[in-house]
Each structure stands twice: as structure tokens, then as C-alpha cells.
Amino acid sequence: MSQDELYRDAADQFGSALDRLARAYEVDPEKRRDLIQEIHFQLWRSFQTFDARCSLRTWVYRVAHHVAASHVVRERRTFKNLVSLEELEMLPDKDQQSNMDQRRNLERLSLLIQRLKPLDRQVIVSYLEEMDAASIGEITGLSPPNVAMRIHRIKNILARRFHDARDHGRGGHAG
């Protein structure tokens, strides 16, 4: 397949997933459009060297996450708001409404994910795209057991953050 054919195939198969990935990395709609454009451009360029040693899906995610992580690093120079998992655990909860609907929960989850450092964000976004630990490991360079451990840890922290917000919204105590 030619570079253009590979790109068209990848864009058709994974375009929606790339949009979701960009949303997880960039909250600002204008910057997100630029990020999506950069992901697509770099993906097209990358097919000059694609040798099918990994699946098309793995290749697409590897390129997209690399571009998105580079974007985060550039943005981080301006905004110093990225935090580690431990720091995320300790952040004060800004949204204490008791009756959050599904959209609010998804927005909160997205914001929490956007606060993660790039590698942790890459792991959880890939997991949410239903990739297994081995595939995520191919993309990130982490071992599958390390990926599984990170996923477990991130899920626990996110679940606690939602639980704490619910308790605060009801006037209860975070435990």
C-alpha cells in the first residue's frame, strides 16, 4: 500500500478514536483542532517508514500519542498544571454538586485525565479505547505488567475522586 492509501485507511478506521485521544490531551477547542491536524499530518508522514512490524492500530496510536505528548510538553512550558498520580489524589475537589449527570461525570473524568502526566494519560486513554496491556505496552514501551499496574492504580484514583466528590456534594465526609 502507498503512503496515501495507508493514511486513508488509518483515518477511516481510527479517526473517531484520534478525536477522542486529542480531547483527552487538550481541553481548549482551538488548540485541540490544531493538535488533531498535527496528529493527522504526522500520521501521514509516518507511513513513509511503516513496515508492518506492528499492527496498523498500534502504529496509529503510537504516532498519535507521541504527537499529543509532545504537544503537552510544549504547553507545559506555558502552563505548569500537570500533576503526578499522587498529586492528583491530593487535589481539592472543585465540583461538589450532589446530582451530577452522566455528561458532568464524563467532563470531570476528562479533566482529571487531562491533568495526568503524558505517560499516565497515554496509558489510561489507550485503556479507555479498549486496548489490552500488551498493545499499550507496544505503544508506550512499558512492560504489560507495568501497564496493568498503572491502569489499576489510575482507575482506583479516579474512582476515589468521584467517590469523594459525591460525599462532599451530599454534605458527608470524605473518608
Image: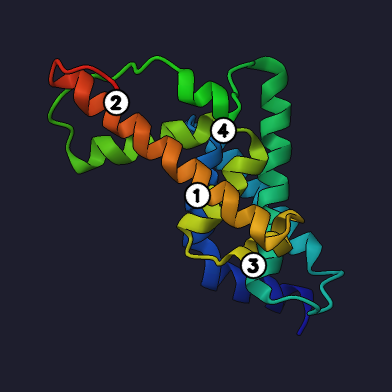
Please report whichever mark, 2 or 1, sits nearer to the chain's N-terminal start: 1
Q: Is residue 54 above or below residue 99?
A: below
The picture places residue 28, in percent across and down from the top left corner, at 49, 29
Instruction: Decide: few, some or many residues near mark 2? Use Cα within 10 Å; few <14, some 14-19, many ≥20.
Output: some
The picture places residue 58, in percent across and down from the top left corner, at 67, 68
Q: Report if residue 41 is visible in the image.
A: yes
User: Of residues 37 and 50, which is closer to you in this image?
Assistant: 50
Please report whichever mark, 3 or 4, sits nearer to the chain's N-terminal start: 4
Quadrant where the N terminus is found in the figure: bottom right
Q: Report if residue 40 is visible in the image.
A: no
Residue type pointed to by label 1: His
**Circle on res. 135:** 3
Instruction: Decide: few, some or many residues near mark 4? Use Cα within 10 Å; few <14, some 14-19, many ≥20.
Output: many
Residue beneath disc 1? 152
Seen as rendered, the residue at the extreme front is 175
User: Of residues 34 and 86, which is closer to you in this image?
Assistant: 86
Please report whichever mark, 3 or 1, sits nearer to the chain's N-terminal start: 3
Q: Distance from label 4 to label 2 (Cα)?
A: 18 Å
Residue beneath disc 2? 164
Asked if marks 1 and 4 touch (Cβ < 8 Å), the reply is: no
Residue beneath disc 4? 116
